[in-house]
Image (spheres, helix red, strand yellow):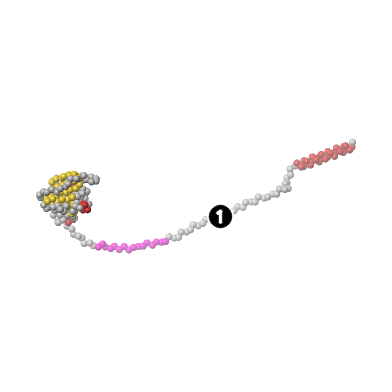
Amino acid sequence: MKSTKIRVAIIATLSVIAIALGIIACMPSSEQPNAEYVPTPTPQVVEIKIIPTPSPTPPPMPTVEPVIEEVVNTPAPTKTPTVQTEKSKKVTGAFALGIDGSTVQVANGVEEKTLEKSPGWLDTSAKPGEEGVCVVYGHRNRNHLKVLKNVKVGETITVTLPDGREFGYIIESISILDSMEELTIPTVSGSHLLLATCYPFHYSGYAPQKCVVMCQLS
């Protein structure tokens, strides 16, 4: 009986010890013996200073000294004036025509080269003031015989020679001919002046007609 009580006491004691050991084993440990603490390094702050690079200094501009030129006023050579009479100024060709207040210079000959510059006198015709017909051909532009567009029968056309002699011719007729119609010099007695140019005066291109003004010495 007594031994039974002892056994029960031992078993109870062992049970308490076992329970205590179990409780201790289940408790969390505050230290971890195998873990190592590695401290985190503190980053170093590196200060970078930006030093401005100076711009290259351009070389100085060369100093240009102004060149002062001495201007010498050389007097122009004195020209001996050419003495011209009033009559010699008016006539520069074979003779000059005074038509409707304008002066038209007439050259010698009726070649195309001559007619490009001025009206021309047919040198095989009579001279101004002489017996026969004095014939003058010209274009219808303003430097030639365009002044004939305003003339009328009965008006006077003046002919001035280089020596100063003047002749007045009265307009007898104004005829308009077809361009294909041949211009003939009439055979008449006395001294006459025939002026021929293209017609109409205001026309672009080849004119289809001719204007013929016949005059008689007054």
**Looking at the figure, which quarter contains the N terminus?**
top right
Neighbour tally class for label 1: few under 14, some 14-19, many 20 plus, Cα within 10 Å: few
Residue shown at 21% from the left, 44% from the top: 208
Coordinates of residue 218 in the picture (x, y in percent) = 11, 49
Coordinates of residue 162 in the picture (x, y in percent) = 16, 56
In this view, which residue lies farthest toward the right? 1
**Looking at the image, how many numbered discs can be counted on the residues?**
1
Query: Dot 1 lies on which element?
Result: loop
Give the residue type that dot 1 points to.
Answer: Lys
In this view, which residue lies farthest toward the top? 1
Q: Quadrant of residue 19?
A: top right
Let me know if residue 68 is in the magenta part.
Answer: yes
Residue shown at 74% from the left, 44% from the top: 29
Residue shown at 23% from the left, 62% from the top: 78
For the question of whether residue 73 can be seen, the reply is: yes
Residue shown at 38% from the left, 62% from the top: 65
**Main SS of residues in magenta:** loop
In depth, the one of 156 and 78 nearer the eye is: 156
For the question of whether residue 100 can be seen, the reply is: no
Coordinates of residue 100 in the picture (x, y in percent) = 17, 48
Q: Quadrant of residue 69?
A: bottom left
Q: Is residue 77 left or right of residue 5?
A: left
Coordinates of residue 82 in the picture (x, y in percent) = 20, 60
In depth, the one of 46 and 146 nearer the eye is: 146
Residue holding disc 1? 49
Q: Which residues are magenta?
A: 62-77
Let me know if residue 119 is in the magenta part.
Answer: no
Q: Is residue 46 left or right of residue 123?
A: right
